[in-house]
Image (tube, rainbow, N blue to C red):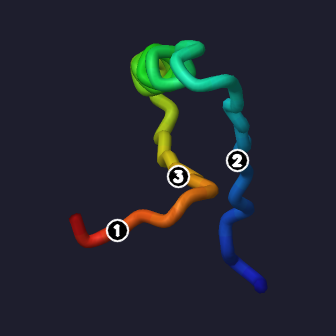
Amino acid sequence: LAGTATMTGRVFGITGWKNSGKTTLTERLIAELTSRGWRVATVKHAHHDFDIDK
């Protein structure tokens, strides 16, 4: 596509056992990256059933 900007990005995956600090790590990583001017988005994946509307 002529005249369009090239987009680049990074993807990080964080996994671990229950109560191992994944959320704490993610929150601190987001804070650090946004302080450096990065735009950050997150997606949570869960292997069990849940209602996204609640």
Tell me the CA gap for discs 3 and 2.
Answer: 15 Å
Tell me which amino acid carries mark 3: Val
Label 2 crowd bin: few (<14), some (14–19), many (20+), radius 10 Å = few
Kindly report which numbered mark, 1 or 2, lies closer to the viewer in this rendering: 1
For the point 76% across and 83% down, the residue is: 2
Which residue does the numbered mark 1 point to in the structure image?
Answer: 52
- Image-based side of 46 in relation to 37, left or right: right
Disc sitting over residue 43 in the figure: 3
Q: Residue at x 34, y 68 (%)?
A: 52
Q: Judge from the rendering whether residue 1 lies leftward or rightward of residue 23; answer left or right.
A: right
| Circles 3, 2 touching at the beta carbon (< 8 Å) | no
How packed mark 1 is, by other alpha carbons closer than 10 Å (few <14, some 14-19, many 20 or more), is few
Label 3: element kind: loop
Report the quarter where the N terminus lies. Answer: bottom right
Please tell me whether mark 3 or mark 1 is closer to you in this view.
1
Label 2 secondary element: loop
- Between the residue at mark 1 and the residue at mark 2, the CA separation in whole angstroms equals 27 Å
Please give the name of the residue rendered at 71% of the width and 36% of the height, measured from the top-left corner.
Answer: 12
Mark 2 — residue?
A: 9
Residue 50: x %, y % from top left: 41, 64
Q: Residues within 10 Å of mark 3 (few under 14, many from 20)?
A: few
- Name the one closer to the observer, 4 or 8: 8
Q: Amino acid at mark 1?
A: Ile
Closer to the camera in the image, 32 or 52: 52
Residue pushed farthest right? 1
Percent position of residue 49, x then y: 49, 65
Residue 3's label in the rendered image is none
Query: Which of disc 1 and disc 3 is earlier in sequence?
Result: 3
- Rendered location of residue 32, percent (x, y): 47, 15
